[in-house]
Amino acid sequence: MSGELRTLLSLHAKQGGTGTLASALRIGRISREHRIESPAIFVSFRGPTVLARREKCLCHLTRAMKVGILLAIVLVAGCGSGIGQTTTDRSIRSLQTHLNLYPQDFRAYDSLGTAYIQKGRETADASYYELAKQALDKSLNLVSSDPAAASAKTHMAVVAMAEHQFEDALSWAQAALALGSGDPSPWAIVGDALTDLGEYERADDAYARLRDPLHPEEESNGLAYERNCRIAYLHFLRGDATGAMKLMRAAIALALTLHLPAENIAWSQYQLGEICFKSGALAEAEQAYSAGLDVDPNSYRNLAGLGEVRTAQGKYSEAITLYQKALAVVPFPAFAAALYDLDLQVGRTDDAHKQLELLEFISRLNPINERLFYRELALFYADHEFKLKESVELAKKELEVRHDIYTWDILAWVLFKNGRAPEAASAIDKALLLGTGDALLNFHAGMIEFQLGRTERAQILFKRALTLNPQFHLLYAEVARERLAQLADSNTRAVGVRLAERSGAQVSAPASSRPANPDAHANASSAR
């Protein structure tokens, strides 16, 4: 990651670090920013030279700096191993060359911004979104009020979505539509922003407008693909997993027909896999994730998704390998969190501790990363009862910009873990509003209800979670079963007590007799 590697290199330099490692970081950074032409320069840093000297270079650094530089080595190794440029890389270079010759070409700046957005999607490197904004700003400086500027404004909306600035995304997309270009594609971003803001009915209306104005019934174009993907997610949120899967499969078939980029097709397979997994269809989830990897072997989302399936299947060694591969492609906190749990599960305590350090390092690397990962960090802290007070602060920061059901779920869970069950109940009610068939969501709700003594409701929620997916979580699936067994045992004892009381009443008062105190009898019946 360009900005991150700059930071790491600066830290290393302050400690007196020079030579091979620093050079590798610097060259990796420059290459990832597309400022050198020859990938052959990586050759001397791909082999054992860097790795053999790694421990010696790290011996004088703090623990946090070691984590950072080890992460940088992973990223540089990833750059080096991908010597062949991608289609997106070639597009970026071509557009840069063109703009050196024609600096007034506003459309080329828009295209360059689009290419940077695609690169950001492929790598999850937030610095590409900043590069995209720079290119798009230049495009809009040249043309801003003409309908031709609608494309650049739409892409600004895409960048804002990627950086979790949902209100800004909505504003940019609406500004693009206001130019009257006739292009309906900004409605996709309007709907996406509204979905993250929790305004689902308005999102429905926006997605319904994703149609060609000249051929509104057309179902085989890019707009149909965009529409089906998004409406599928809303179907899932509303408890219609079957309908969601059907729409996603239709979207994937269309993406293949339209020859969309591999990353987009792999992303669609991942979305299908997620819906399948959360609905307990493990075989279908495995098939979707595997299909995504067939299209794009470096699809970090599908690597992690398949790791989640292997975890549910109890194949922990395979799951660890898959998460490690995903983390090597893109260092996401969620991947480090999953590895932390798996490492503890198999008794690798030292490795688990490294994952914890890595997770916190990634999450706090820069302001953009911190904003992007509020949710993941809050959930991890709550799950493992680390920094519980901070977990609430993070969840509330997320709620400031995002009001979807999963933000309410995270807030409910961290409040519950902080011993604030009544507040958690209010938040989880909002999370359950759509009837989403997500096992983990129902488990969280069940734990809150259990804590509040609402045992019947808790029992329903635990059963629902385990029915949806009996292995929905490495740790919590077993907790759900234990709580259900505990509730069943309590119910059995309660029934026994009631039967004993009834039997005693029959012995002391024959059926033909009336109690001396009718009010007492009524109260007892009511209590039963």
Image (cartoon, grey):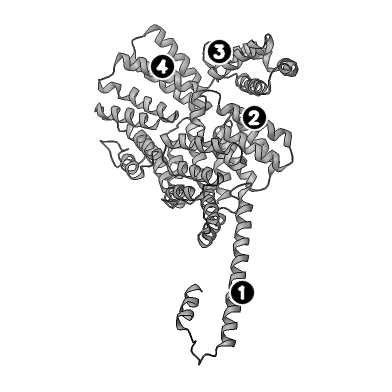
Alpha carbon separation for disc pair 2 and 1: 52 Å
Residue type at mark 1 is: Gly
Q: Is residue 106 left or right of residue 393?
A: left
Going from the N terminus, do you reach mark 2 or mark 1 first?
2
Q: Quadrant of the N terminus?
A: top right
Taking the spot 26% from the left edge, 36% from the top edge, the residue there is 213
The disc placed on residue 496 is 1
- Distance between the alpha carbons at the discs numbered 4 and 2: 33 Å
Q: Earlier in the sequence, mark 1 or mark 3?
A: 3
Characterize the local packing of mark 1: few (<14), some (14-19) or many (20 or more) Cα atoms within 10 angstroms.
Answer: few
The reply to whether discs 2 and 3 touch (Cβ–Cβ < 8 Å) is no
Mark 1 → mark 3, Cα distance in angstroms: 74 Å
Q: Residue furthest front?
A: 516
In x, y percent, where is residue 371?
Answer: 48, 29
- Residue at mark 3: 30
Foreground: disc 1 or disc 4: 1
Establish if 8 lies above or below 273.
above
Left or right, 442 with reference to 140: right
From the image, state whether disc 2 or disc 3 is nearer to you: 2
Of residue 438 and residue 449, the one placed in the foreground of this image is 449
Numbered badge on residue 357: 2
Query: Which mark's residue is nearer the viewer, 2 or 1?
Result: 1
Question: Circle 3 sits in a helix, a strand or a loop, which is it?
Answer: helix
Sequence order check, earlier mark of 3 and 4? 3
Real-space CA distance between mark 1 and mark 4, rounded to the nearest whole angstrom:
72 Å
* First along the sequence among labels 1 and 4: 4
Circle 2 sits in a helix, a strand or a loop, which is it? helix
* Mark 2 vs 3, N-terminal side: 3
